[in-house]
Amino acid sequence: MIEVHEATKVYRRGRTEVRALAGVSLTVPRGEFLSVMGPSGSGKSTLLNLLGALDVPTGGSIRIGGQELARMDDTSLSAFRRERLGFVFQFFNLMPTLTAVENVMLPGLLAGRPRAEMLSRAEALLETVGLRGRSQHRPDELSGGEMQRVAVARALLTEPALLLADEPTGNLDSKTGTEVLRLLREATRERQLTVVMVTHDPRAAEVGDRIVRLADGLVVGDERVSSQAA
Ligand code: ADP
Ligand code: ADP
């Protein structure tokens, strides 16, 4: 599913260079839930941005589903992001003026999919994440955990192959965070979805099948999770 080979990323700002990734190699099979941990500044977000084709590596290669990202032009990259990827963020990134169901439908509408189909799928996904009856609420009428569940439903709308999550529990208390992760785990397992989740929280990380640790832009640990925490 994902093959990262010797990926490097150097940020240049004037005369200073920051080596965010110093040669990361990583294979993630289809259906795996991978947690990425590491101290602040270790390159986690950079790796996620490269996997999400939001940024390009300075060196090395990244293949997702057999496609080399560096060989794709901008049009195919944005189609790839729209059709094959789902994103979940720390701060939910919901549109404040739209209802829950409209937020969930949005990526489908932006991708030009039929409205009626997106509406029924969005309603079904909201039910899957336990938000039946909340579909007409706007984000400011929802709790943090509910907003993140809306975001999970939104990420699943276009039936992506890969879901990227950046600190999805970072803004939730631990009980709510665990609930959201359990849900994410179930929804992705049912769909054979590959997940890469960046987290600071060791308990959140253990929801995954495997934990990769980064330090100074390098992989310094790679272990399987023995018992599923959630
Ligand atoms: P997190 O650890 O929560 O993923 P960020 O990725 O936002 O945090 O930031 C990690 C580090 O990268 C921080 O030290 C931040 O200052 C730095 N950083 C992020 N974006 C930029 C940027 N555009 N320019 C310079 N430094 C940045
Ligand atoms: P993490 O997510 O683990 O906190 P990041 O990938 O955000 O780490 O950052 C890795 C390193 O790259 C840090 O030293 C950070 O300051 C730097 N960095 C990240 N983004 C930028 C950017 N856009 N411009 C310059 N430096 C950046």
Image (cartoon, grey):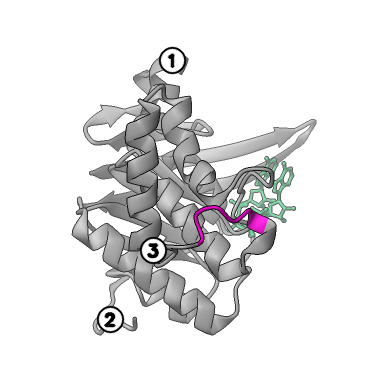
Q: Residue under label 3, please give it.
A: 129
Q: Residue under label 1, please give it.
A: 75
Q: Is residue 167 among what the camera can see?
A: no
Q: Earlier in the sequence, mark 3 or mark 1?
A: 1
Splitting the image into 4 quarters, where does residue 220 fall? Answer: bottom left
Q: Residue at x 36, y 68 (%)?
A: 183
Image spot of residue 214 (x, y percent): 48, 62
Are the residues flagged by discs 2 and 1 in contact, CB closer than 8 Å? no
Mark 1 neighbour density, 10 Å: few (under 14) some (14–19) many (20 or more): few
Q: Is residue 149 left or right of residue 60?
A: right
Note whether 90 is above or below 18 in the view shown: below
Q: Residue at x 61, y 68 (%)?
A: 144
Query: What is the distance, in whole Å, between disc 3 and disc 2 at their CAs?
Result: 20 Å
Kindly state the secondary structure of the residue where label 2 is placed: loop
Kindly state the secondary structure of the residue where label 3 is placed: loop
Mark 2 neighbour density, 10 Å: few (under 14) some (14–19) many (20 or more): few
Q: Amino acid at mark 1?
A: Thr
Image spot of residue 34 (x, y percent): 34, 62
Specify whether residue 137 is painted magenta.
yes
Q: Amino acid at mark 3?
A: Val
Q: Earlier in the sequence, mark 3 or mark 2?
A: 3
Q: Which residues are magenta?
A: 134-139
Q: Residue under label 2, please give it.
A: 228
Specify whether residue 129 is painted magenta.
no
